[in-house]
Image (tube, rainbow, N blue to C red):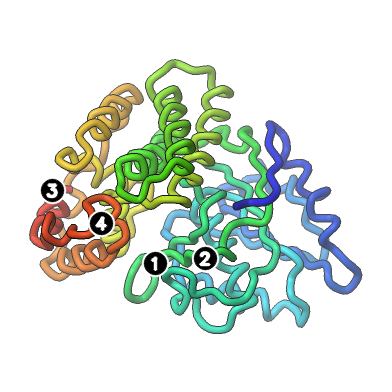
């Protein structure tokens, strides 16, 4: 679990104070990874970077990749001989996942692709701090960092992955485009549906999932004040991330991973695109999802996979089918007798 949390509007301005105790003479470099959407100055000037620090602006328009992590680690290591005292990720799920992965790979030899899986990380990561500017992914609290690798989309799932500290400032979500706000929020909602209806559920996970689900319904079905909506969605993201950290996601995420691997579809949007076709598995979840989508006036893209080749569909299906823990959580140990590769492919053709 994340051991230190700062919460509140304007709390981003405490980041310099948070970093100060980590700095020491001769070993005080901090690496900031920030979404390049903030290059316009909204946040850039508030980052407490000192002269010896490194601020790297990164586009979140594409899913994070293992080779991107490797390149960032090489860039950081080329800066100097000393290991940075901290990595700070500022942005949505992409930037948070990159920060977690880079923090791990600075102290573990090899490629990030070598660590995709469960409990493969042996060396403790350097101190890493997450500052979410979007709410919904749960990346700020989860024990995974999901990356597109050379063969699959899969997380580095380990006890060394979670952030050491998180700064939750709901004001950082001001100005997020509505469609992106919705897609990322639905990632949280779908986390809850998959966790609460799955076989891996337990009382600890359920308590977080039920709270996150209730908050999502408030945010997307009621007419809230914008500040209240930002605060509630930030808390929903946190609780939803905690819920899946102690249980597991399900069919929507398995399919979304396959879609993203081939099409490069952003994670939140990918979840929405597949979830609308999963009524047979999550009837109540899909019903409420459609209610939320209509309430918020969101139209999902159509015919996304129309131009896909047979090879593309085969790859999507193979990636999705390989996510065995997700299918087992949703359908049980005998999940292979309940859904076939052909049925999975058919869902992809409908998107």
Q: Residue at x 55, y 66 (%)?
A: 101
Q: Please rate how many residues cluster around mark 1, counting C-alpha atoms within 10 Å: few if below 14, some from 14 to 19, many from 20.
A: many
The picture places residue 197, in percent across and down from the top left corner, at 30, 41
Question: At which x and y percent is residue 80?
Answer: 75, 79
Q: Which residue is mark 4?
A: 327
Left or right: residue 99 versus residue 126 is: left
- Distance from label 2 to label 4 (Cα)? 20 Å
| Distance from Cα at disc 4 to Cα at disc 1 | 20 Å
**Circle 2 or circle 1, nearest the eye:** 2
Nearest to N terminus: mark 2 or mark 4:
2
Q: Can you identify the residue that label 1 sits on?
A: 148
Residue with the mark numbered 2: 158
Residue under circle 3? 350
Which corner quadrant of the image does residue 314 belong to?
bottom left
Residue 282 in the image: state x and y as whole percent. 22, 39
What's the CA distance linking mark 3 and mark 1? 23 Å
Q: Secondary structure at mark 4?
A: helix
Nearest to viewer (mark 4 / mark 1) = 4
Q: Is residue 165 left or right of residue 326?
A: right
Compute the Cα span from label 2 to label 1.
Answer: 17 Å
Residue 331 is situated, as x and y percent measured from the top left of the image, at 21, 51
């Amino acid at each position: 679990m994340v051991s230190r949390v700062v919460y509140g509007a304007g709390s981003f301005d405490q980041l310099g104070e948070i970093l100060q105790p980590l700095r020491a003479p001769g070993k005080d470099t901090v690496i900031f990874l920030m979404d390049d959407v903030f290059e316009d100055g909204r946040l850039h000037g508030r980052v407490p970077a000192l002269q010896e620090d490194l601020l790297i602006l990164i586009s979140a328009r594409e899913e994070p990749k293992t080779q991107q992590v490797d390149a960032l680690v090489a860039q950081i290591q080329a800066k100097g001989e000393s290991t940075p005292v901290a990595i700070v990720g500022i942005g949505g799920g992409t930037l948070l996942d990159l920060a977690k992965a880079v923090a791990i790979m600075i102290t573990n030899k090899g490629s990030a692709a070598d660590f995709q899986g469960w409990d493969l990380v042996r060396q403790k990561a350097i101190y890493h701090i997450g500052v979410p500017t979007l709410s919904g992914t749960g990346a700020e609290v989860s024990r995974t960092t999901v990356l597109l690798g050379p063969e699959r989309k899969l997380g580095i799932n380990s006890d060394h992955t979670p952030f050491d500290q998180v700064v939750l400032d709901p004001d950082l979500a001001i100005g997020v485009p509505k469609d992106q706000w919705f897609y990322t929020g639905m990632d949280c909602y779908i986390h809850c549906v998959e966790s609460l209806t799955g076989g891996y559920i337990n009382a600890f996970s359920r308590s977080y999932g039920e709270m996150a689900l209730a908050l999502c319904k408030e945010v997307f079905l009621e007419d809230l004040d914008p500040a209240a909506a930002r605060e509630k969605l930030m808390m929903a993201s946190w609780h939803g991330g905690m819920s899946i950290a102690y249980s597991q996601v399900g069919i929507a995420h398995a399919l979304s991973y396959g879609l993203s691997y081939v099409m490069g579809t952003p994670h939140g949007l990918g979840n929405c695109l597949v979830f609308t076709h999963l009524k047979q598995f999550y009837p109540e979840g899909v019903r409420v999802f459609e209610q939320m989508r209509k309430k918020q006036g969101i139209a999902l893209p159509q015919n996304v996979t129309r131009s896909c080749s047979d090879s593309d569909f085969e790859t999507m299906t193979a990636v999705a089918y390989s996510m065995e823990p997700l299918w087992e959580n949703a359908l049980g140990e005998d999940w292979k007798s309940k859904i076939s590769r052909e049925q999975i492919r058919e869902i992809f053709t409908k998107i």
